[in-house]
Amino acid sequence: MVASRLLAYFCEHAFSHWLVGRALGIRFSGYGLHGTSHPQHYPPGMRLFFSRLPLLSARADPASLRAAKPVARASMYAAGTVATVVASLGIPGYCWRRGVSGARGFFVGANLWSVPLLLSESLRAGGDLRRAWRELAR
C-alpha cells in the first residue's frame, strides 16, 4: 500500500502535466528525475528527504506554452495537483475498501498531506493552481 502510493507520488504530478498538456497541443522540451523544485515548502525535517527523492519532472516548451490557449495552459497547470489529490484519495481509499490493515489511517494521513499541498499550490505565486486561475482570468 505504501509502496504503491510512493511510486505514484514520484511521477503522477509531472506525468499529468505532460498528459493533459500534450492532449491540448502543448509540447515539452525536457524531462528529468530529481528532488522537489520547492524544498522550502516542506517542513524542516522533510526538506532534505524531498530534495533528494527521484521525482519525475516535465519541462514545457516556452514557445508552445505561449502559443497555447489560456484554457489549455490552465488545464495543464492544474492537472498535476489534481492528479496528486486524486491518487491520495484513490490508492489509500481502495486499500481501505479492500480491508488492508492500516489503510484507514493511511487514508487519513495521505489526505491530511493534501491540505498543505492545496494551500501551497493555490496561494504561492508559482503554485500550479494559482497559475491555472491566472490563465482563466485572462
Image (cartoon, rainbow, N blue to C red):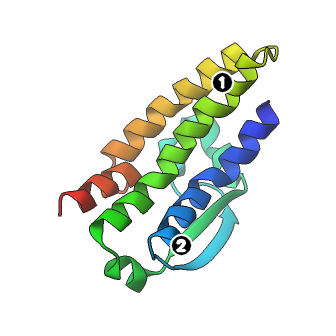
Query: From the image, which quarter does the C terminus lie in?
Result: bottom left
Q: Quick one: label 2 or label 1, which is nearer the N terminus?
A: 2
Q: Position of residue 121 (x, y in %)?
A: 40, 46
Residue 125 visible (yes or no) = no
Q: Amino acid at mark 1?
A: Gly
Q: Which residue is mark 1?
A: 93
The residue located at (66%, 24%) in the rendering is 93
For residue 30, which numbered disc appears in the image? Answer: none
Q: Position of residue 55 (x, y in %)?
A: 67, 56
Is residue 117 toward the left or the right of residue 32 in the image? left
Query: From the image, which quarter does the N terminus lie in?
Result: top right
The residue located at (81%, 37%) in the rendering is 3
Circle 2 packing at 10 Å, graded few (<14), some (14-19), many (20+), is: some
Q: Which residue is mark 2?
A: 59
Using the image as rendered, state which of residue 63 and residue 93 is in the foreground. Answer: 93
Q: Position of residue 105 (x, y in %)?
A: 68, 15
Is residue 33 toward the left or the right of residue 23 in the image? right
